């Protein structure tokens, strides 16, 4: 059967959908710190867990390698890149600039729905931190939910896309550390900074919102660097 030439440029829908889903799932593992720096990723195991063939996983991994969220070692293994202290400091500076800007934009452009989402996320993480034995994986998810509720309130899809790319690199370090070290949550700095950001956005105070996010990112980074777990 003859087909229009343009159809040769269209990927099969099922395969494309599965590839997108695999990318989203693997990206979430990185952003949420469920994959550690240096940890190897088996394509076959990932395909089995996701319930797909290996092809969509290979496509997703290729995208994440292009994003520099994963890397291929000389022996062809796929792993989460290791991060040096210098790289982490550089990433932290960029996050402060971009995520602080997003928070400032959120203070200027948020609507009632945004304010409700931010308030729910802030209250949920605060409540979790006050538990006698906080669920650290849940706290990580709530932290991510709060931050992206703030960034979505900027109403700039491009800005959110850039921030997600930053979190692909930062997530394995900052969130794995939070999962492994309950004292970081117990200190309460993040809870206080989140409250500051929520109040600033509700008041339309762009400078205070930007400062609150900067303080939150800086506080977490200083804690991680102080532990000396990153390469010099």
Image: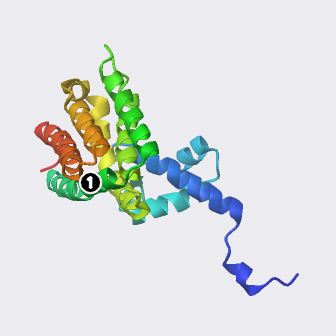
Question: Residue farthest to the right?
Answer: 1
The structure's colour scheme is rainbow
Q: Is 120 in front, or is 90? A: 120
Q: Quadrant of residue 132?
A: top left
Q: Is residue 21 above or below residue 173?
A: below
Q: Is residue 217 above or below residue 73?
A: above
Question: Residue farthest to the top?
Answer: 132
Residue shown at the point (43%, 39%) measured from the top left: 117
Residue shown at the point (17%, 56%) measured from the top left: 93
Numbered circles on residues, count? 1
Q: Is residue 184 left or right of residue 59?
A: left
Q: Quadrant of residue 16?
A: bottom right
Position in image of residue 134 (x %, y %): 34, 20
Position in image of residue 18 (x %, y %): 63, 55
Q: Quadrant of the N terminus?
A: bottom right
Position in image of residue 13 (x %, y %): 70, 63
Q: Is 193 in front, or is 27? A: 193
Position in image of residue 6 (x %, y %): 71, 83
Q: Is 91 in front, or is 142? A: 142
Residue 70 visible in this rendered orientation of the protein: no
Q: Is 221 in front, or is 181? A: 221
Residue 95 visible in this rendered orientation of the protein: yes
Check disc 1: other Cα within 10 Å, few if <14, some if 14-19, many if 20+: many
Q: Is residue 216 left or right of residue 49?
A: left
**Residue wearing tag 1:** 104
Residue shown at the point (35%, 46%) measured from the top left: 150
Q: Quadrant of residue 130?
A: top left
Callout 1: SS: helix
């Amino acid at each position: 059967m003859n087909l229009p030439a343009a159809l040769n440029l269209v990927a099969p829908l099922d395969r494309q959908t599965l590839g997108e889903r695999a990318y989203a799932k693997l990206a979430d593992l990185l952003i949420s710190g469920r994959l550690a720096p240096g940890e190897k990723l088996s394509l076959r195991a990932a395909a089995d867990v996701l319930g797909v063939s290996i092809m969509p996983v290979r496509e997703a991994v290729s995208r994440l390698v292009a994003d520099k969220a994963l890397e291929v070692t000389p022996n062809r293994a796929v792993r989460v890149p290791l991060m040096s202290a210098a790289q982490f400091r550089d990433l932290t500076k960029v996050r402060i600039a971009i995520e602080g800007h997003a928070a400032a934009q959120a203070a200027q452009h948020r609507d009632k729905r945004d304010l409700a989402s931010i308030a729910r996320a802030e209250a949920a993480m605060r409540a979790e931190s006050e538990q006698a034995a906080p669920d650290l994986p849940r706290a990580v998810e709530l932290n991510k939910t709060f931050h992206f509720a703030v960034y979505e309130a900027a109403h700039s899809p491009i800005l959110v896309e850039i921030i997600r790319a930053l979190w692909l690199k930062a997530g394995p370090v900052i969130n794995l550390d939070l999962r492994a070290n309950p004292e970081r949550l117990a200190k309460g700095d993040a809870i206080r900074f989140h409250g500051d950001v929520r109040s600033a956005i509700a008041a339309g105070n762009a400078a205070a919102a930007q400062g609150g996010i900067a303080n939150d990112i800086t506080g977490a980074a200083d804690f991680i660097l102080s532990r000396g777990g990153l390469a010099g």
